[in-house]
Image (cartoon, helix red, strand yellow):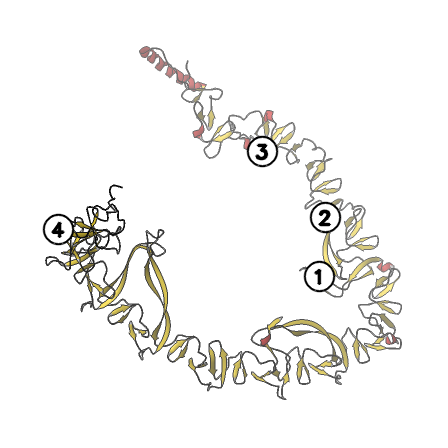
Amino acid sequence: MTKCPNNAPSASFGNKTCVYRECSENRPFVVNNTCVEKCPNTDQLTFTDRYYGFNYCVKNCEGKYRFNNSCVNVCPPLTVAVNNSCLNHCPSNTSYTCMVKKGYQCGKNPFRGYFDHAVCVNTCPQNMLIWKQSCVNTCPDGLALFGNECADTCPLYYPYKSNSTKTKDCDWAGRCREAETLLKCVRKCPADSYVVNNTCLSHCPYPLLHTNNACVLTCPSSAPFTRNSTLVLESWTYVSSYYSRNRPYRRNKQEKVIQKCINYCADGQLILNLTCVNKCPEDHPYIHNRICLGQLCETQYSTESSFGIICTDNCKPQQFVHNKKCVETCPVTNVLFNRTCVDYCPESHLLTSTYIVGEICLTSCSAQNVIKECVEKCPAGLFELEKTCVEFCHKPLYTTDDKCVESCPSDRPYTVTSSITVAKWSKDGNRYKKKSISEDILKCEAKCPADKVLSGTACANSCPLNSRFITNGKCRSDSCKTKYKFYTSAGVLCFDKCPNDLFLHNDTCYLQCPDNLYAMGQKCINDCPPTHEVMNEETIVKQYYNCSWRSGLLCTDSLLSVMRCRKECPEKKVLHNGKCLDFCLKSTFMFDNACVTKCPESHPFMQPTLATISKWEELTDDSWFLYTENHPVNICTAQCHGDYPLHFENTCFNDCPKPAPYIDQNSCVKNCPGDKMIDIKTKVCVDKCANDRGLFNHSCHYNCPDKKKYIFDAHCVSECPRSHPVAIKENRFICQKSCENEQIFKDGECISKYDCDDPMFVYEGLCLRKCPDAFVWVGSCMDTLGAKIAIAVLGVVWLQQTWHHGQPTCSKTDVCY
């Protein structure tokens, strides 16, 4: 290497060693790329290269600032840049200092918060503030802005300091392009702020309290209570990241709990040392008149709650008293007496089995809500037993007057076994569950029920075999001394006379006559007498009820049938071969409440109809239900009517049969008689065709055949006459004078007159291609006489035109001769 590079001077003159980091201490300066002991007289100023660490000797500080004997890029702190020199203070002709970035004017710095040094200016820019003869972007902390100056103390007429935030270009999430919070001097504080040392605050500093926009150590007498309140405080954070470069400011929200002075605590709150609280602390657990106390209640009772022990003189209606406390339920070992939990009931009261607290329990109750209660009388459904109330009286005890007794009283000496539905409560975890069960009990009665028999002192369903005979409801061992007897499941009933609802045969009463016997009155006989030779099967239903499985139907559990001898059949039945039937068989006809094989001459016609009968149908559970069903039958009638008005060979029809398809005066015939014609559509024989029918081949047609498809004057014709030229297909080509609604006729349909296009033309309601026969076109359709006159006039005109203009011409709608 013949020469050291510019960034690595030689160690000394003549020395070929290149220095890459600082010259030696005895040669600290660099001149002509060589380390020297001191700078020459021509280059007395020095400049330090901060990257390589060399001190260069220079003649002047071109492009830099001079500070003492050194050249610097920026003036050091506590100096100002004036005309490329760093001075301790500004000259007398300038007023303010301003921090700038090198190369930029005061107030034009694009790099937020980054400055090189201070410069001197005559006035601060409009976008900057004044503080102690300096131009600043923002006032220092604690100083308020008044006008464009930062003030330690606000002036008399704007005495308060208050923060306000200005934002710019914010989005929905509270992100802003700009956000600036300023402390300003204001005439008065905002309505929601508090004043401390002439400063407007969003909340008072601890331990001050809040009242009427002021911060105080103690609350005033007008608002002596304190209550916690939550404020939401806002602040702004500058976030420097790629994603927030457009809107770097973020709004932050923070909750702060403060204490406010109020005149009284809100409903539901308690008072502790003049402070509103939601719950009393453990060292002040008692509550009296909403005040938390440390000593025991002086009232008659107390009740526990989630927010403390309440002192009260009266328990709530649904509460009970236990050891001077109001409780929701008594302990398990206690019973309830006069709303008080006691160890046992007094002598004057009984003990009920269960008591439901505060609710109606159907099948399940909370365990703490089921307790026992002392009562003067057992509630309905319970029975008294040795000073207690029980669900039912267990055998061998008897039940009488809602009490359990060891023997029945003399006025009720008889016992009846019956069932009773009782509620059984069982504990399941924290709940009581109720189950309804049936229990048998022995009831004391003055007499046995009608469906029971007396066996000894017991009312039983049946007598024992050794005393199976029943007289006056009592079971006896000796046989009947009466005239008649009646065998039942309970025993053999003895009667002097059979009851009216039973039948008699020999010396025995029956529910129904035995097989092959007939009933006449109350007796059962082998054959019906000549006076009552009609036999009718009767159904006997002693008791029926509404069916549970379907509304509107009747059901019964007992159904008997008896064949009874009668003089005649009852109403709604018919006689056939000596028996009463619900309806006649298919081979017979119904006439005068009897079934006949042939209708009489007075009623020669057989007409179909429906016979509706009521019938009992057996179910699978030994019960029956009543329903109705319809059966087709034939009745004899003097004249066919109703749904069957037509007749053929003494039978009524609703439509004529194929052998006689035509109708002549309600009679079905093979052909119409005499000169009568057939209406093809209705198949009725008529003397003349109706106006909307057409006569063709001695028949009235609803639609005429194609060769003569038009209908005019009740005839089928090949075309309509001029007087009735209109025939529409939709109207079966019936000839009519004109179309309706001012329409015109064209090719079988009615159209608007505006749809009759050239070369066709409108004439007398018709759209035509040429005039009708015997008419010619002379400006319009004219008959031949009128046409001759018109042609003569036209001829004269034509000759004149020919004389003056040459050969005649003729339009497509004119007639030329």
Q: Mark 1 and mark 2: span between their CA atoms?
A: 27 Å
Q: Which mark is residue 41?
A: 4
Q: Amino acid at mark 1?
A: Leu
Please tell me how crowded label 3 is: few (under 14), some (14-19), or many (20+) other residues with Cα within 10 Å.
some
Q: Looking at the image, which is closer to me, 121 or 431?
A: 121
Q: Which mark is residue 554?
A: 1
Q: x, y (%) of residue 8?
A: 25, 47
Q: Is residue 545 visible?
A: yes
Quarter assignment of residue 97: bottom left
Against 690, residue 191 (above or below) is: below
Quarter assignment of residue 321: bottom right
Instruction: Confirm or deny contact between disc 3 and disc 4 (CB under 8 A).
Output: no
Q: Mark 1 or 2, which is nearer the eye? A: 1
Q: Amino acid at mark 4?
A: Asn
Quarter assignment of residue 575: bottom right
Against 762, residue 661 (above or below) is: below
Label located before the other in sequence (3 or 2): 2
Q: x, y (%) of residue 163?
A: 27, 64
Q: Which mark is residue 221?
A: none
Instruction: Confirm or deny contact between disc 1 and disc 3 (CB under 8 A).
Output: no
Q: Mark 3 or 4, which is nearer the eye? A: 4
Q: Which mark is residue 609?
A: 2
The residue that disc 3 covers is 692
Q: Amino acid at mark 3?
A: Asp
Q: Amino acid at mark 2?
A: Thr
Callout 2 secondary element: strand
Q: Mark 4 and mark 1: span between their CA atoms?
A: 141 Å
Q: Mark 2 or 4, which is nearer the eye? A: 4
Please tell me how crowded label 4 is: few (under 14), some (14-19), or many (20+) other residues with Cα within 10 Å.
few
Callout 1 secondary element: strand
Callout 3 secondary element: loop
